[in-house]
Amino acid sequence: MESDKVTPDCLVFDVDGVLIESGDSYQGVMRAVVEDVSRASGFEIDMPGYSKELNSVFKNNDSFNDDYDIIWALANIVVSRKGKKLSEAMPSPEALGKMLSTCSGDCGEWLPRHFAIKYGRLEIRALGQDAYCGVKNPPGMWTRDVPALEARWESMPYPVYIYTGRDLKEWRLAEIVLKWEGFPLDRVVHADTGIRKPSPKGLEYICGRFGHERPLFLGDTMGDRMAASGFGKGWFAAIGDLMPDAPLSFPDVKTALSSLIGWRP
């Protein structure tokens, strides 16, 4: 990737943690699902089912860009351990870090090699999506989301694209939060396209289809960073506090855009 002055020909945004402040909603989903399956497995729920510290460990491993995979992994790790209370089965952030140090690539191959699988990947995804989208229990935790950038994409100085781990249903909810209804769907690489981070194919698709060579990709997880590195062109801006060692690191998307391209909403 280029390291000189940032002169992009397009902007590519991740959604959660970049365009939308969704930590409260998604971490709420994670806590709720882990607590529900732990309770169903006989554990007394004496502590929260998720934490900011655990989230940092998962998000710094590029095998866990999908939040539902985080729930799937943590739920099965917990219920495979001994104890009567959730506090006895929940790994500490340090213990979780050691566990995940052996995980690379698809976590779906790693998890069954190390832990008994009581809850299936699709089963956990369905529980998580119900909690987030409000399919069976309206209105859903997505209503806690707030935009981190209150500006329409048309007002930005470069063409705008999306590379997200959300599926199409969840992207449609993001459009509502952002007030971006009508954003061209062919500019969105979402999970239902079959392209998932940390693959660079999302950036390859965007640049190949629309004729760009110097994307500025703004993301908040190691999966985003790996996708940008694999693509090898343009620049990656790390948003938030998960990757303070990134060459371009900013506390929020507005600061990043102001500092890098001189644009303010």
Image (cartoon, grey):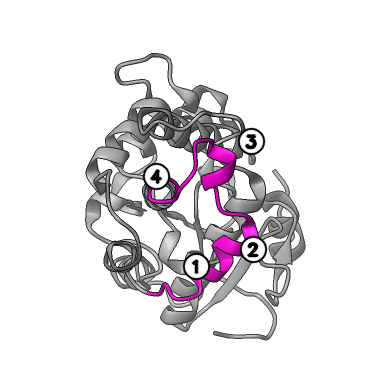
Measure the alpha-carbon separation of dots 1 and 2: 9 Å
Q: Residue at x 37, y 73 (%)?
A: 200
Residue 194: give x, y in percent of width and height.
22, 58
Q: Amino acid at mark 4?
A: Val
The mark nearer the N terminus, 1 or 2, is: 2
Relative height, residue 4 to residue 129 (above, below): below
Between 13 and 246, the residue placed more toward the observer is 246
Q: Amino acid at mark 2?
A: Glu
Q: Nearer the viewer, mark 4 or mark 1?
A: 4
Measure the alpha-carbon separation of dots 1 and 3: 39 Å
Residue 47: give x, y in percent of width and height.
62, 33
Q: Which element is circle 4 on?
A: helix
Location of the N terminus (image quadrant)? bottom right
Q: Residue at x 50, y 47 (%)?
A: 15
Q: Residues within 10 Å of mark 3 (few under 14, many from 20)?
A: some
The numbered mark at residue 79 is: 4
Q: Amino acid at mark 1?
A: Met
Residue 104 visible in image: yes
